[in-house]
Amino acid sequence: LPGHLTVKDGHLYIGRHDCTVLAQEYGTPVYVTDEDRLRENFQRYDSALKKHYEDVQLLYAAKANGNLAVMKVFAELGAGADVFSSGELHLALLAGMEPEKLLFNGSSKTKEDLKLAVEKGVKVSLDSFDELRQLNKIAGDAGKIVEVSFRINPAIDVPTHPKIATGLATSKFGIPADQITDAYRAAMECENVVPVGMHCHIGSQILDVAPFAKAAEVMVKVAGDITALGVRLSFIDIGGGLGIPYRHETEVAPTPEEYADAVLPVFLQGIQKLGIKPQLWVEPGRNLVGDTTVLLTNVNSVKTAHKKFVNVDAGFNLLLRPAMYDSYHEIIVANKADKEAETDYTVTGPICETGDIIAADRKLPMIEDGDILAILDTGAYGYSMSSQYNCRPRCPEVMVAGDRSAVMRRAETVIDIVNTMKKLPWHEK
Ligand code: LLP
C-alpha cells in the first residue's frame, strides 16, 4: 500500500482517517483524497526533475482531477496547468495559478476558447494551420500578441491502452513531422502570434521510461530545425504520461527519479548542443493525483448466480475507467481489511448496463451487504470522467488533511439535474 493508506484494527485508513467512519459521516459513494499525499507527489516529481535542471515548470494536467481544492494545493506549490478547455482555464485561474504558467491545449478549440486564451494572456498550443490563422485574427482584433507553441506529433508507439496513446503517427493530435517547419514558418509570418514553444504528449499510463526518452530526442531534434528558422524557444513541453502501479503486487512503475534520469540527460544534451536554454515544461496528471484518492462504496447486496456478484453503489457513472479501458483498480474491504481474500467476486455498479463492472473475478474476503469497499487509485480520471447516467447525481468529494476532513465538492441532487431542463413552450404542463 502507498504510505498514506494503512490498516489498523481491521479497518482501512486514509491518512489518519478510518474509511468506515468517513463512509458513515459523508455517506457513500464518496471520493476521499489525501492532501498530504498530493503535496508529497508534487514535490517528489518537481525535485526529481530540478535535480537535473533548475529551469523546470510543472504544469498539472487539470483533466486528471479538476477539483478546485486539489488545484489550489498545486497552485500553492508553484504549479501551472495544462488546460484542455475554457472550463479548465477558468479553474486554473480560480485556483490562483498564474496565466504565464498555463498552456491552453487541445486539437479542437472553438473561437470562444481562443478568445478567452487571448483575453487571459495564456499561451496556446496550436494543433493545426487553421487554428493558427484563427488565433492570429482573434489576437489582432483584440490588439494583442499571443505566444504559442505547436503540438508536435512525435510518431512514437507506446506500450499503453490504445485509447490513451496520443502520440502515434495515426492519432488525431499534433502536427506531423513533415509539416512542422512549415507551421513555425507560418507562425513567424503572422503579425499577432509569436512562436516561443514546442509541445508534445505521447500517451498516458506509460510504465516504461524509454518512450519518454525517445520523445525528448525527437523534441530536441525538432528544436534544432526550428531554431535554425530563427524561432527563439522559451519553453519545451514534453507532456505528461508517467503511469502508476495499479496492480500493487505485480506492476512496477518507474519512479519520477527514474523518469528524470532517463529523460533529462537527453533533453540537456540536446539543448546544450543547440546553445539554447528553454524552460522545460512537464505536464503530469495521473502521477500527481492517481494514488491520493479512494472511492468508498457500499455493498447493497450480494448475489450468487453463475458467479458471485457484489452489487455496490458506485458504477461507471462515477468510475468509468474499468468499463472504458478494462482498467484494474485494487479493492480493499474497508471494514475487513485484515481478512484473508478467499472468494472470487465480480463487483458491479448500479448502472443499467452489463458492462458496469468495477472488477471481474476478484478475490476478496467474504462479503456481506453493508460492507464498505475502498476502490484504490481513483484520484486521476475518476470524478473527472463521471456522468449523470441513469439520472444519478454525482457523489461528493472529501479532502482529508491531518486530523481534518471536509467536503470539497458537495453531492449533486436530483433537483440539480432536473433544474437544468426546461419546459418547452408548446407543452401545456
Ligand atoms: N498533457 C496532455 C496534452 C494530455 O493529453 C494528457 C492526458 C496529459 C498531459 C496528462 O497525462 P497523464 O500524466 O495524466 O498521463 N482517461 C484516461 C487518460 C487519458 C489521458 C489523456 N491525456 C485514463 O483514465 O486512463
Image: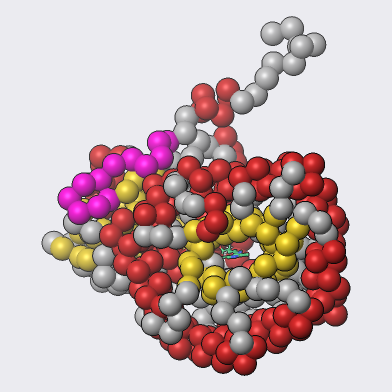
Q: Is residue 248 above or below residue 426?
A: below
Most extreme residue toward the top, as rendered?
A: 428
Name the residue at 80% across, 64% down. Answer: 187
Residue 386 at what x, y percent from top left?
A: 54, 48
**Can see residue 214?**
no
Of residues 300 and 306, the one nearer the viewer is 300
Residue 338 at what x, y percent from top left?
A: 21, 67
Of residues 310 and 411, the one nearer the viewer is 411
360 relative position to 236: left or right: left
305 relative position to 374: left or right: right
Q: Is residue 163 above or below residue 104?
A: below
Residue 74 at what x, y percent from top left?
A: 40, 57
Name the residue at 56% across, 43% down. Answer: 90
Task: Tell me how the rendering is colored.
Answer: secondary structure
Q: What is the count of numbered marks?
A: 0
Most extreme residue toward the left, as rendered?
A: 9
Q: Which residues are magenta?
A: 400-411
Residue 217 at what x, y percent from top left?
A: 64, 88
Name the residue at 61% across, 82% down. Answer: 276
Dividing the image into 4 quarters, which one contains the N terminus?
bottom left
Q: Quick check: is 407 in the magenta stretch?
A: yes
Name the residue at 71% across, 53% down. Answer: 145
Specify the quadrant of the image occupied by residue 180: bottom right
Of residues 71 and 77, the one nearer the viewer is 77
Dividing the image into 4 quarters, which one contains the C terminus?
top right
Q: Quick check: is 88 in the magenta stretch?
A: no
**Can see residue 160?**
yes
Question: Principal SS element in the magenta part?
Answer: strand
Q: Quadrant of ligand 1?
A: bottom right
